[in-house]
């Protein structure tokens, strides 16, 4: 930082010059005496800036990843090489993070060689990626005659994860994979859940004999069980609509976390102005990959036509369950749903309702248009339901578990799905 004269110094110098000129012109000492205090103030201010205000600013963030509602602490460490009578600090807090009143700006005094530590507490109110650590510093000399400004750029990336909801039960795919998991397969084999009984054949284990049925029928019978398997689940996020994207990302995060906890293979497709995808995977690493991809999702205006042919075949396995999170407004997304259903892919649509964000304008014409729009949306839902696709309307603020339970109770799901 380098000292620069302030407007106050310029005014004082102007007054001193006017007093000297007035004294010389009038030949009287009174104008000169009047500006003596201003001259003394300027002299004191100049004497206080003998050295440049060398202040080093280092920022530290306590966590790199947090969840919505968690606290974040930004630590600012200051080290002054020279005296700074007044140092104003302003911390840039991005929109989505909230700092307490008075936390964003501080005014302190530093002595030569002094180190100071300042703690700024913030609350993460909205999911997203944030750049933190940007600090603006303004040093002021004695009597505010000189000022110096410095800037510490952002050095930290904070990832705020959406707060996932707890889902007790999930919609299940009809077909399972060979990998072990928490879902009961339709096939019978070695497992825990009882399936049926059958007569004993060569190769059966003695421990599987059902002694009650054997005693009742007079011949050895054994138990059959359902093996525990996993499924492939693909979260298909509609990123065309920016109005409902915040709620859609939160729902997608909750669904992905719940399926991964059940040891299922979870993939992700962000279908919008830009198309991104993740192949199905399991484990904590896959969960972080899914969340990081969701946090990077942004609505981009794009009129280019897109369909699911852009996706590699492995992203949508034939036996996968695709859970679509969409407001069902963009034609490209609507056609993608039809294409997936025609290919025989099992679909479940969680419709993020835009009704909470749109209200009819004043006048009867607006009311009629609003009602026609509602009718069009209902007709669209019925069209997908006639194709065997459960469509469940979900409002932001409503528990996601309610929508999942409605999808599980759908007639097609009751006849064809397990879980």
Image: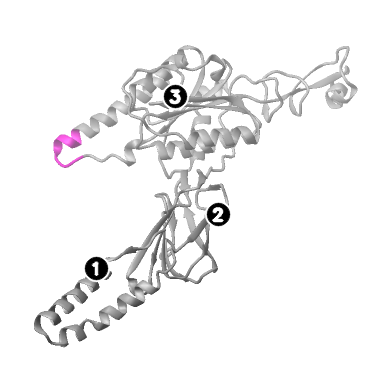
* Residue appearing at x 27%, y 78% in the figure: 39
**Labelled disc at residue 77:** none
- Where residue 2 sits in the image (x, y, percent)? 39, 59
Q: Find disc 3 in the rendering and name its residue.
A: 275
Look at the picture and state if 357 lies above or below 90.
Answer: above
Query: Taking 172 as reference, is 226 left or right?
Result: right
In primary-sequence order, the first of circles 1 and 2 is 1
In primary-sequence order, the first of circles 3 and 2 is 2
Q: Find disc 1 in the rendering and name its residue.
A: 10
**Residue 223 visible in the shown view:** yes
Nearer to me, 313 or 341: 313
Nearer to me, 89 or 131: 89
Query: Taking 274 as reference, is 189 left or right?
Result: right
In primary-sequence order, the first of circles 3 and 1 is 1
- State which region is magenta: 361-368
Front of the two marks 1 and 2? 1
């Amino acid at each position: 930082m380098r000292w620069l004269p302030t407007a106050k110094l310029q005014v004082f110098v102007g007054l001193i010059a006017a007093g000297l000129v007035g004294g010389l012109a009038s030949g009287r000492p009174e104008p000169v005496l009047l500006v003596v205090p201003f001259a003394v103030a300027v002299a004191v201010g100049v004497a206080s800036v003998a050295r440049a205000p060398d202040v080093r600013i280092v920022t530290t963030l306590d966590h790199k990843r947090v969840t919505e509602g968690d606290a974040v602490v930004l630590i600012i460490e200051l080290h002054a090489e020279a005296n700074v009578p007044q140092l104003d600090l302003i911390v840039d807090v991005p929109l989505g993070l909230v700092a307490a009143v008075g936390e964003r700006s501080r005014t302190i005094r530093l002595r030569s060689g002094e180190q100071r530590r300042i703690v700024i507490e913030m609350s993460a109110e909205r999911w997203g990626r944030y750049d933190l650590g940007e600090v603006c510093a303004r040093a002021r000399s004695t009597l505010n005659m000189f000022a110096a400004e410095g800037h510490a750029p952002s050095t930290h990336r904070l990832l705020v994860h959406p707060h996932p909801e707890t889902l007790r039960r999930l919609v299940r795919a009809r077909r399972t994979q060979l990998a072990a998991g928490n879902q009961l397969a339709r096939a019978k084999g070695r497992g825990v859940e009882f399936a049926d009984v059958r007569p004993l054949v060569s190769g059966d284990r003695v421990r599987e004999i059902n002694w009650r049925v054997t005693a009742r029928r007079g011949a050895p019978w054994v138990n059959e069980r359902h093996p525990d398997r996993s499924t492939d689940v693909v979260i298909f996020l509609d990123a065309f609509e920016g109005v409902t994207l915040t709620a859609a990302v939160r729902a997608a995060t909750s669904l992905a976390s719940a399926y991964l906890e059940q040891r299922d293979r979870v993939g992700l497709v962000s279908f919008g102005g830009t198309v991104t995808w993740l192949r199905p995977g399991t484990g904590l690493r896959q969960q972080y990959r899914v969340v990081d991809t969701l946090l990077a999702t942004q609505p981009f205006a794009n009129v280019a036509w897109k369909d699911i042919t852009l996706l590699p075949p492995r992203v949508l396995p034939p036996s996968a369950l695709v859970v679509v999170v969409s407001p069902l407004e963009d034609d490209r997304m609507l056609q993608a749903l039809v294409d997936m259903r025609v290919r025989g892919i099992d679909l479940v649509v969680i419709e993020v309702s835009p009704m909470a964000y749109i209200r009819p304008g004043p006048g009867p014409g607006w009311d009629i248009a609003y009602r026609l729009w509602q009718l069009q949306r209902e007709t669209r839902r019925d069209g997908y339901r006639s194709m065997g696709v459960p469509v469940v309307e979900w409002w932001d603020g409503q528990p996601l578990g309610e929508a999942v339970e409605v999808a599980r109770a759908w007639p097609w799901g009751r006849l064809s799905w397990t879980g």
